[in-house]
Image (cartoon, rainbow, N blue to C red):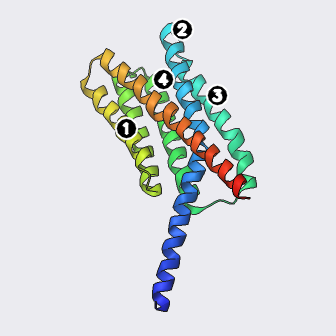
């Protein structure tokens, strides 16, 4: 092998290591997928049965605070990677955009459930797809496809079909994916301890 071949191999190994670390970081934050999935269910139940306009903003703000607290502590304990910053930026930008648009629709009186679910589906699909493309993770891309399917269903489906699709997307893309990440992270932690 020439010097250039070795250098290229080292760079590819570095990229693969960074991608693997990005997946491990996402797995470590799997609980946030579950948290937000449960938060969506709480907001849906509260707004449906409690008929409260505060359900979504209050639930989302509380969830954001619950997410930010451990995030701010963990940043000091572990070095930050370029891929980690990219993934964090994608999700932070999506969260701020989603909150801004949906809050504005609610305040302006232009809120409509099909539009609401189409926006959520499109934005969560985009964030999951971007993360999956950066991390080369097919499972997360499957989540993006489910969210995009919700966006399309919200544009063409009845209220009942769209609501069922929304509840299913939350379950599979937030709860199940989050639990999968948590289990994978736990398994890898046990393997690391066994090797140590």
Crowd tier of the residue under label 2, counting other residues whose Cα lies within 10 Å: few below 14, some 14–19, many 20 or above: few
Distance Cα–Cα, label 3 vs label 2: 18 Å
Residues at marks 2 and 4 touching, judged by CB atoms closer than 8 Å: no
Q: Earlier in the sequence, mark 2 or mark 1?
A: 2
Identify residue for label 2.
50
Residue 122 pos. (x, y %): 37, 38
Q: Earlier in the sequence, mark 4 or mark 3?
A: 3
Distance Cα–Cα, label 4 vs label 3: 19 Å
Q: Nearer the viewer, mark 2 or mark 4?
A: 2
Q: From what the image shows, is residue 113 above or below residue 34?
A: above
Q: Is residue 116 visible?
A: no
Residues at marks 4 and 3 touching, judged by CB atoms closer than 8 Å: no
Identify residue for label 4.
107
Q: Residue at x 69, y 60 (%)?
A: 79
Identify residue for label 3.
62
Q: Earlier in the sequence, mark 3 or mark 1?
A: 3
Crowd tier of the residue under label 3, counting other residues whose Cα lies within 10 Å: few below 14, some 14–19, many 20 or above: few
Residue 64 pos. (x, y %): 62, 34
Residues at marks 1 and 4 touching, judged by CB atoms closer than 8 Å: no
- Left or right position of 69 against 170: right
Q: Earlier in the sequence, mark 3 or mark 2?
A: 2
Q: From what the image shows, is residue 194 above or below residue 1?
A: above
Identify residue for label 1.
122
């Amino acid at each position: 092998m020439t010097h250039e071949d070795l250098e290229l191999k080292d760079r590819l190994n570095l990229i693969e290591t960074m991608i693997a670390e990005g997946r491990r970081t996402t797995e470590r934050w799997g609980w946030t997928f579950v948290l937000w999935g449960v938060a969506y269910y709480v907001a849906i139940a509260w707004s449906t049965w409690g008929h409260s306009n505060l359900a979504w903003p209050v639930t989302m703000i509380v969830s954001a605070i619950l997410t930010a607290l451990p995030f701010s502590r963990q940043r000091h304990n572990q070095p930050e990677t370029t891929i980690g910053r990219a993934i964090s930026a994608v999700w932070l930008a999506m969260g701020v955009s989603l909150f801004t648009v949906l809050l504005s629709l609610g305040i302006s009186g232009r809120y409509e459930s099909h539009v609401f679910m189409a926006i959520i589906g499109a934005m969560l699909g985009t964030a999951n797809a971007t993360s999956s493309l950066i991390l080369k993770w097919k499972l997360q891309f499957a989540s993006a496809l489910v969210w995009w399917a919700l966006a399309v269903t919200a544009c063409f489906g009845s209220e009942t079909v769209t609501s069922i699709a929304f509840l299913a997307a939350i379950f599979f893309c937030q709860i199940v994916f989050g639990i999968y990440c948590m289990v994978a992270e736990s398994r890898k932690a046990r393997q690391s301890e066994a090797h140590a």
